[in-house]
Amino acid sequence: MVAKIKRQIGSLSLLAKLGLLLLTLLLLLAAILLLVFLLPRHHRRPLPPGSPPANGSDPDNIVAFDFSPYLILYKSGRVHRMDGTDRVPAGVDEGTGVKSKDVVIDRGTGLSARMYLPPPAKGGDKNKDLGALPVLVFFHGGAFVIESAFTAKYHDYLNKVTAKAGVVAVSVDYRLAPEHPVPTAYDDSWQALNWVARNGKSGPEPWLRDRGNMSRLFLAGDSAGGNIAHDMAMRAGKEGGLEGGVAITGILLLDPYFWGKNPVGAETTDPAVRRKYEATWAFICDNKYSIDDPLVNPLSMPAPELRKLACSRVAVTVSDLDIFKERAAAYAAALRDSGWPGEVEQYETAGENHVYFLDKPSSPKSAKELTFVAGYLSRE
């Protein structure tokens, strides 16, 4: 049979042989394609995905210091802030009628501030408050590492304080650690405070020159900002006051951030917690100052030093569940006991945590504390 087929093929012409070869190849290709498309595929498992490239040695991904929930510093110097990076514009606040604007204090360093001006009293003379409004210099909190004068949290708070107290307010945007470790925050704040004093006397800033009463100058701040407000009054006492002979009337410390090596009162004795706060302070100041330096622990100052506080009134607010409560209360007591001749007030809120009034601004307790703050700033 095979021999017969061979004879038949052999008798074909060359053209016929080529056609037969082509037909055979087409049939073979069709069979291969049929096998590919008809065979079940469920047994053909995909290859596992490749592992991401190893980055364990990349300094941009190696944590140098974890300051959660505020920020993480990486070995490369990259800083990842987890909070306090939003920014809202200045303008006119619909709820209070307060006007705000941003000013540059030092173009070289970028030091700036947001200013606030209350609306005229309803039904009153628009010129009545010319040169009569108390001046408030405010320092925001955020552990020296987050937040700014331009975040929604502080913008909303300053609008409320400005409206209720009837003050010209200047919210200072000092530079933050770790890029600018302490004492930069203090130095920026001191420069801003003297800028306010200078402009309040002779301008050119019109809100301070024309509307503010520099004989009623107050400093205030929450948490780290409260710490700064205290330090500014201490610095004024040690350095002979502010520019132009301007005096500080009072300071308002809202849940201030103070700490120290040894527990005060009912402060925690947990070694791990105390080590954590020591480590974070060392991070904030790049190991320049100990945890008992007067910058962070004013209780370490002897009474004669504490009496140099350059103001006549001090108010300290504390929150019942705040870890810094005990030291803030001890600060107020130490000031009274030091022989300092001014007036010390303390305001306490039960059942609330650190700076609760910023986190829960609409709560009845926050409204009550705002009334205390406004009354303290507006009282003659």
Image (cartoon, rainbow, N blue to C red):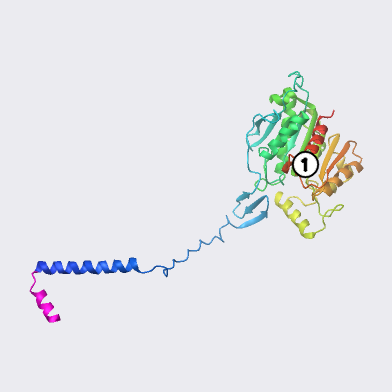
**In magenta segment, residue 299:** no
The answer to whether residue 338 is left or right of residue 254 is: right
Task: Give the structural element (helix, strand or loop) at label 1.
Answer: helix
Q: How many marks?
A: 1
Identify the residue at horizontal 60%, vertical 58% (top origin): 62
Q: Quadrant of residue 379?
A: top right
The residue lying toward the viewer, choosing from 8 and 217, is: 8
**In magenta segment, residue 2:** yes
For disc 1, the marked residue is 226
The answer to whether residue 6 is left or right of residue 289 is: left
Q: Quick one: label 1, few (<14), some, or many (20+) residues within 10 Å?
A: many
Q: Which residues are magenta?
A: 1-13
Which quarter of the rendered picture does the N terminus lie within?
A: bottom left
Q: Position of residue 300 (x, y in %)?
A: 84, 48
Secondary structure character of the magenta stretch overall = helix
The residue lying toward the viewer, choosing from 330 and 29, is: 29
